[in-house]
Image: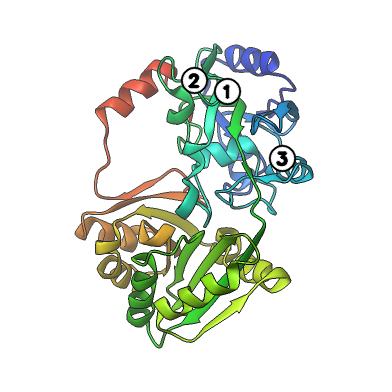
Amino acid sequence: MTPLAPQSLSDLAEAVAASAPAPVIVTGGGSKRPRGLAEAAPAHVVDTRRLSGLVAYDPAECVVTVLAGTPVADVAETLAVHGQYLPWDPPFVAEGATVGGMVASGLSGPGRYRYGGVRDFVIGARVVDGRGRVIASGGQVVKNAAGFLTHHAIVGSAGRLGVIGEVSIKVFPRPDATCTLVARGAAAAEAWAAHERLRQSTLDLDALELDGDTSTVIARLAGASDALPARAARAARALGLDAEIISGADEATAWGAQSLARWSQAAALVKVPCAPSRLMPLAEACGRVGRWRASVGGAVLYLAIEGDLAPVDAVLTAHRAGGAVVCGDAMGRWLGADATSVFGDRVRHTLDPDLRFR
């Protein structure tokens, strides 16, 4: 079927309504789901890339509203002019991620450790449901809590609740300066012990990650430039490992090398929520079937799985853990322990009573 390419919210609503009762697949920049897979599926494909542009932006209010097909890179560029940014470090920006895809995937980068994830910053949205109706939720001001929070429900929904048409996001002032500590342990267990010493310290970290492949701890500090050297020295002592302190271009290169897009490459990327107290046993088991890294101070385990997903499904099930494929051909598939939600099913049947969204 020819992809539907709406240019406005009204076009989007009409396209979804007119395509009934056929199934619908939503695609944006294609940074997380291969575009060829979607276009080959026996369904109407809604391509949001022409649904792009700035709707409203008031730097004084720290809120930006954009259409869903807008590249995240364009939003970041607009914000940078006013000294503001998206503090959760959305991944896949360089790969062409759109705002709608950013919200639908629910993925956040290293900055989630201090500031919270994308769900914490979405304050409003307009979504087209399975019947072609425009559902408005939240608004363009931070203090808006009226009604059901549909704009939060769509975060991480992978396009199965509706087509995101417009999103309002709160933003933050960019910090004065940053620096990053990089420390490698002799093994994953040693690196994890250093990670935990840093996490449990009183330091105000901006980000904290652990690369399981290289047993490397990566921690970022942000704030006033004159205070960073002393803070970095304290962090290095807390780590208890030899640490390199980098900034500027070297820092940007180090975090770029750790990006989810570059790290996972052609593999299926699986996101597994976890508690730091349970992470290492689970990571060690998953390490036998794929690569792993810990994010958000050990609250999230990411797995890069080549080939068959059955082994990781079995490992997660055995450890009573579950995770979603958030990038790759199997995007949206759940692995491991059952995550059936009666409330979630009710929400889906309300927004998509004919179960058109795939």
- Marks 3 and 2 in Cβ contact (< 8 Å): no
- Of tags 3 and 2, which is closer to the observer? 2
Q: Secondary structure under badge 3?
A: helix
Question: Which residue corresponds to the image point at 44% horizontal and 50% vertical from the top-left?
Answer: 325
Q: Quadrant of the N terminus?
A: top right
Question: Which residue corresponds to the image point at 27% horizontal and 32% vertical from the top-left?
Answer: 341
Q: CA distance from mark 1 to mark 2?
A: 6 Å
Q: Is residue 283 above or below residue 17?
A: below
Q: CA distance from mark 3 to mark 2?
A: 23 Å
Q: Which mark is residue 144?
A: 2
> Do we see residue 204 in this rendering?
yes
- Marks 1 and 2 in Cβ contact (< 8 Å): yes
Residue 178, position in %: x, y? 62, 63
Among the 4 quarters of the image, the one containing residue 27: top right
> Do we see residue 51 in this rendering?
no
Disc 2: CA contacts within 10 A as few (<14), some (14-19) or many (>=20) = few
Name the residue type under label 3: Val
Q: Residue beneath label 1, please?
A: 141
Query: On the picture, is 338 further left or further right than 174?
Result: left
Q: Which mark is residue 75?
A: 3
Q: Is residue 353 above or below residue 69?
A: above
Q: CA distance from mark 3 to mark 1?
A: 18 Å
Residue 124, position in %: x, y? 54, 24
Query: On the picture, is 49 further left or further right than 217?
Result: right
- Marks 3 and 1 in Cβ contact (< 8 Å): no
Name the residue type under label 2: Asn
Disc 1: CA contacts within 10 A as few (<14), some (14-19) or many (>=20) = some
